[in-house]
Amino acid sequence: MAESVRRILGKPGSVSLQPYTKLLKSIEEREEALRELGDAELTAAAAELGNAELPYDPADLAELCAVGREAARRALDERPFDAQLLGVMALLDGNVAEMATGEGKTLAGALAAAGFALRGQRVHVLSVNDYLARRDAEWMRPLYELLGVAVSWIGQESTTEERRAAYAADITYASVSELGFDVLRDRIATDVSELVVPEPNVALIDEADSVLVDEARVPLVLAGAAEAAESDAAMAELVRRLRPRTDYVVDDDGRNAHLTDAGIDAVEKALDGVDLYSAEDTTLLPRVNLALHAHALLQRDVHYVVRDGQVRLINESRGRIALLQRWPDGLQAAVEAKEHVAASETGEILDSITVQALVLRYPTRCGMTGTAMAVAEQLREFYELEVAVIPPNKPNIRVDDEDRLYATPEEKEDALLDEVAEVHAGGRPILIGTQDVAESERLAKRLGNAGLECVVLNAKNDADEADVIAEAGTYGRITVSTQMAGRGTDIRLGGSDMADRDRVVETGGLYVIGYGRYPSSRLDDQLRGRAGRQGDPGGSVFYVSVEDDLIANNAPETRGYDVSSADGAITDPTWRRTVDHAQRVAEGQLLELHRNTWRYNQLVDVQRGVVMEHRRAVLSDDQGKRQLAVDCPATYEELIEEVGEEEVARAARLITLYHLDRGWTDHNAFLADLREGIHLRFLGRRNPLDEFNRDAVPAFKGFLDEARARAAEMFTEAKVVDGRVDVDAAGVRRPSTTWTYMVQEHPFSTDFESVVGKLKNIGGRTGD
Amino acid sequence: MLGAFVRAFRTPDLRNKLLFTLFILTIYRLGSVIPAPGVDSVAIKQCLQNVQSGDAAGVYSLINLFSGGALLQLAIFGLGIMPYITASIILNLLTVVIPRLETLKKEGQAGQTKITQYTRYLTLALAVLQSTSIIAMARTGQLFQGACPPSSYLPDDGIVTLVTMVFVMTAGTCVIMWFGELITERGVGNGMSLLIFTTIISAFPSGMMRIWTEQSQWVFAIICVAALFLIAGVVFIEQAQRRIPVQYAKRMVGRRMYGGSSTYIPLKVNQAGVIPVIFASSLLYLPTLVVGLMGPESTSPVVTFLNTYFDPMGTHPVYMTTFFALIVGFAFFYVAITFNPTEVADNMKKYGGFIPSIRPGRPTAEYLDFVLTRLTTPGALYLGLIALLPMVALGSSGASANFPFGGVSILIMVGVGLDTVKQIESHLQQRNYEGFLR
């Protein structure tokens, strides 16, 4: 009843399962007949389904599910439950299916992917990491083969050839970042034969909430090496003499450093009394600031290493050295000056794409996750996706205890250790979820000191971690893990082979302990969902301290709690509400951030679309040649006679593409610059977003014409060497190396949202 | 500029938004002239004319400004959006007082949705209250201060009729509230502001008609020209801003070819908007209220004093001077509480921004303060003058009360108009088209 009311009101997350459940009976009726068929006949039955267009009509849908069920039974020895088939049908209609952990999302996704592929669609199955992409593709391969569709996967190590071959398959499994990097690299291709990614058709997203919401605002970046910068040794030396706290201040979060008044005086004096802030010479201050940034914010062996006389960046999330990567905008040279090594090429951002824009390229999108309802409104707002809630195959019997609240983190940790020791004594497997890697390592150390052996996951090697997490349900095991580590892998009771299952069930199943609440209730639920898989017994509890970041940052006015017992536990019920409130504040901020990224990218995406469309015409349709034939007919005719039509087409293409790319990179830099200070417009009671668009539109005006004019200019000056147009000598420069990365934290980030937030507070509540 | 309008109409979903907005506004206007059941529409129009030419006209001008005359006609949308506005103001004030609302406000959108829900409930309550009192006043004849017998426009004052009227007017307010949200959501501009805007300009034709019939053609022509100039002037000043250039010097800007500074702090001449005028008007409404409470015929010296100097017709020099001074004062006050130069300077310093030739930190704050004060002085004077202008210009001719171009209306009108145009523009710009405003 309540459900139907929600549906009438159009509330999110209320896709009706009625039309699907109706089919379940006929699917079951078909089962017996299909069982009689030989493998080849089953494949033929699947192929038969491909003779019509999408979407599936009910009869075909039932047939697909029946064939899929039989194929899965034969190929994987798994007969899909009704719940899984409901998921398949919801996916085929372009919804996000909410299916609890352990309900067999991978299989449901595979059947849906096959359903799309049979009707001639190219399906990209997007996972959160390379390991899952490969594992799922290999795991489902027999099923796909029986259904007669080709499957392949892409990993970080795949070569260009392998990638191209993989994308040619009907179904391609890839991590979101790898796909994004391929798309970005295609954008700077100078020859049709270099292209890798085909036209987007269907995207099927695993762990949809994580990809579409948590990571949506993380841009994937393609950077290239620009020309060498000059090393500024004098400035590095000057900055080294400054005293911390007296001459310069570093923010608490270690992301910004700035000179104090004393520091400004000291620098100006050292530079013979110049005025750092003069309007005439604006080159000095950036040099000082860059040197300060390198000196105060970047630490050797934490952020970079010096090896073979070169500065190498460390990729923080992976803990590995990023070989190609360089810092942009002069920071690389500043660090090199600091370390007294020779200056190298500086980095330059060529283009970027957000996960959101990447997913929105696909005309058909669908996905599955364990926690979609909590973000249903966002999925609708940003992706036009509806959520279908698939009921679990067996009811969930996990026991979720109330949060245990403590005054200080120390008391919380003590209590948690006591709890772990007590539960562990009974042999019950324990999974402790922490906020970040550092926290898990510290906690593991304390557990070790207390004689409690534990396994730690630190999100550095996906494949190893999947193996570790799969064993987390073993008798007497303690596992400490961050939220994301090992996601996508089931925890079976009694170990991955379930050998010891009965003994573990007796202890009460997996016991999940949250070491502090996450910034959203959805992430809490993800952690909880680790236990109680497929009707297994299990339990969960969160240990929260009033001084946890989540509460301290988002409900700062909270003071004067009543510590009711000696161990610092707080039982005052109003405190539970405070914790929930703090979490909701954090959720609200994240949503605002997401929305802002989205809004600011809308116009940029339109402009990028214009450039890319033109680029495509130049790349594959000789648009450049035609333009140059019109713009400089004399040179054109001359060259045709000298080197022939084909060579002129090549030169025209390279020159035109160079100017398009150069212009786009510059425009991107302009937009980044504009965005940096746009929040100040708020002070004039203007909407920063409108102001951003207002300035970005005229800046883009005439972009294509200008690129065309520059290309024509270069074309007239091109010389012929050995029967070829020497475009390099004319000035066409491609970046010598390129590299890709996901931006978790931009080195120059203004922390836009928090600034606007603060300015809004300054701006007061009056007015608007 | 014209091209941009054409383009706005050529962009399909923007055209739909514009048409949708117009459609809703049309229905809103229709509902504002349809009387509630039980009201004799011909008779009540006559009463309205009587009362507008009578002595008490001034009292009604403010009420009518926000209801577009619909209230006195007992129209189904008679209460207008006033209950909603009042409810929003009350809830805004309550967020400061009630901790629960404050926590909600901090929770971002989810919390805001709940506050909006409370606002709606409060609007409903206020609407019931207001419609009941209005209809009670109409029944006793108080509505027109006895200028018109109630039996003429309310032929049947049985309880069922009255309850129906209360019900209809309350429902009307809820529908208007919904209209406002619909426009904000699916149309262009802020729904509530646009509804006020429509109400205000709907009074123009009849106001102009009155001037046409009551005054000579020359006066009419002069007023028209003056009004045009006035509006143009207000638009000009509302758009005027001082741009303080800011540079960010955290990194090397390599081969950038664009010139000039894209980063600046825009300081508006009239940073405070229409708020000081509204504050001052509400404050000056107090004397009228006092007089009303004590009875206009009372011989108390207070009443005599207030009647002499603070006559709501507002033409006495003391009244005008007070009004002017209040507006100027509020303008400065508002700027002082909303713009804190020290915080802005600290913020810039933290993120590596500076004003060329000025050191970050205190010198920057002092500079900002200096510019702001110098800018607000003419801004405040302008606000005061605009608010006073119609009174001064028309005070002698006795047409001020009925003059449609009151200072408040013009400021609101221009403000809402500009905002809406800017919104249309931002829709265009998001599609990479140029807008019309510079």
Image (cartoon, coloured by chain):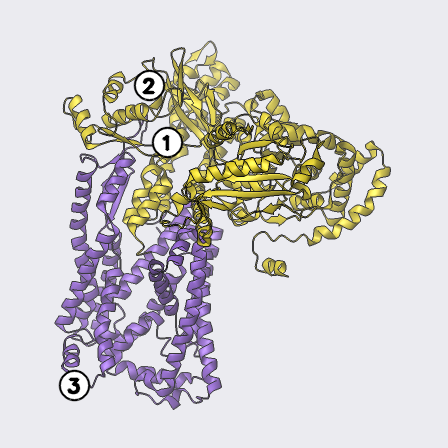
Chain colours: A yellow, B purple
**Which of pointers 1 and 3 indicates the residue nearer the eye?**
3
Which secondary structure, mark 3? Answer: loop
In depth, the one of A216 and A483 nearer the eye is A483
**Which of pointers 1 and 2 indicates the residue nearer the eye?**
2
Q: Residues within 10 Å of mark 3 (few under 14, many from 20)?
A: few
In depth, the one of A378 and A229 nearer the eye is A378
Residue A472 location (% of width, % of height): 61, 32
For disc 3, the marked residue is B299
- Horizontally, residue B146 falls left or right of residue B159, namely left
Q: Mark number for residue A229?
A: 2
Residue B284: quadrant of the picture: bottom left
Q: Chain of mark 2?
A: A
Q: CA distance from mark 1 to mark 3?
A: 75 Å
- Horizontally, residue A195 falls left or right of residue B135, namely right
Which secondary structure, mark 1? Answer: helix
Q: Residues within 10 Å of mark 1 (few under 14, many from 20)?
A: many
Residue A246 location (% of width, % of height): 22, 29
